[in-house]
Image: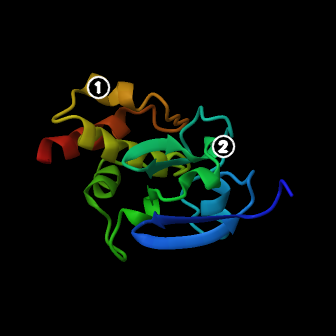
Amino acid sequence: MINQPYPISCKVNGQTITADVSPEMRLLDFLRYELDLTGAKEVCGEGECGACTVVLNGKTVNSCLILAVEVNGSKITTIEGLSDVGNLNQMQEAFVDHHSVQCGYCIPGMVLSGEQIIKDHEKPSRDTIKEDLSGNICRCTGYQKIVDAIESVSETS
């Protein structure tokens, strides 16, 4: 009885989704395996690395720490929801232009976090950008190019 499916309805990237999920299914698994949205990645499974970052009701969250049943009635944006069919948005373009993408594992979370930084701060300083990115780990770039990309978008916003 405890493992009975639970009905949820939420908006994911602007599309209404209804599904039955098990009570223990994480949002990360729901997005990846039920909706085939593979931008959010499983790395640490403990909310420490940011590779599974999505936007939930206007705030970035680690989808590995949230149960799918908790998003009933919510609005979720994944990296797949940022671009228009084949066209990158401004933040994604900035990451390309500043050569911020190397292995790509952390990039979806970094881009979504960059978007949130721009929404939360008008013209954020480099220190603010670094502080707000602190929950996202990158092993390839050393962060300089990622901060440059986010800063460039903030200067044009």
Q: Residues within 10 Å of mark 1 (few under 14, many from 20)?
A: some
Residue 138, above or below 106 = above
Query: Which secondary structure, mark 2?
Result: loop
Instruction: Kindly give the residue lying farthest to the right in the view shown.
Output: 1
Helix, strand or loop for disc 1: helix
Which amino acid, mark 1?
A: Thr
In front of the other: 33 or 27: 27
Q: Quadrant of the image for the N terminus?
A: bottom right
Q: Is residue 121 depicted above or below 54 in this figure?
A: above
With 128 as the anchor, is 101 left or right in this view? right
> Which of 68/141 is in front?
68
Looking at the picture, tell me which residue is in the foreground, 5 or 145.
5
Amino acid type shown at disc 2 = Val
Specify whether residue 60 is in view: yes
Residue 128, label in figure: 1
Measuring from the top left, give residue 151's x and y in whole percent. 23, 38
Question: Where's residue 119, x and y in %?
Answer: 25, 43
Above or below 28: residue 17: below
The quadrant holding residue 40 is bottom right
**Residue located beneath label 2 in the image:** 43
Determine whether, in the image, residue 44 is placed left or right of residue 134. Answer: right
Q: Is residue 77 visible?
A: no
Task: Kindly give the residue lying farthest to the left in the view shown.
Answer: 156
Label disc, if present, on residue 51 of the rendered structure: none
Of the two numbered discs 1 and 2 on the same chain, state the one appearing first in sequence. Answer: 2
- Real-space CA distance between mark 1 and mark 2, rounded to the nearest whole angstrom: 25 Å
x, y percentage for residue 74?
A: 46, 56
Give the residue drawn at x 32%, y 47%: 115
Identity of the residue drawn at 49% across and 42% down: 61
Query: Which residue reaches farthest front?
Result: 1
Q: Residue at x 54, y 58 (%)?
A: 72
Write the residue at 16% across / 36% down.
122
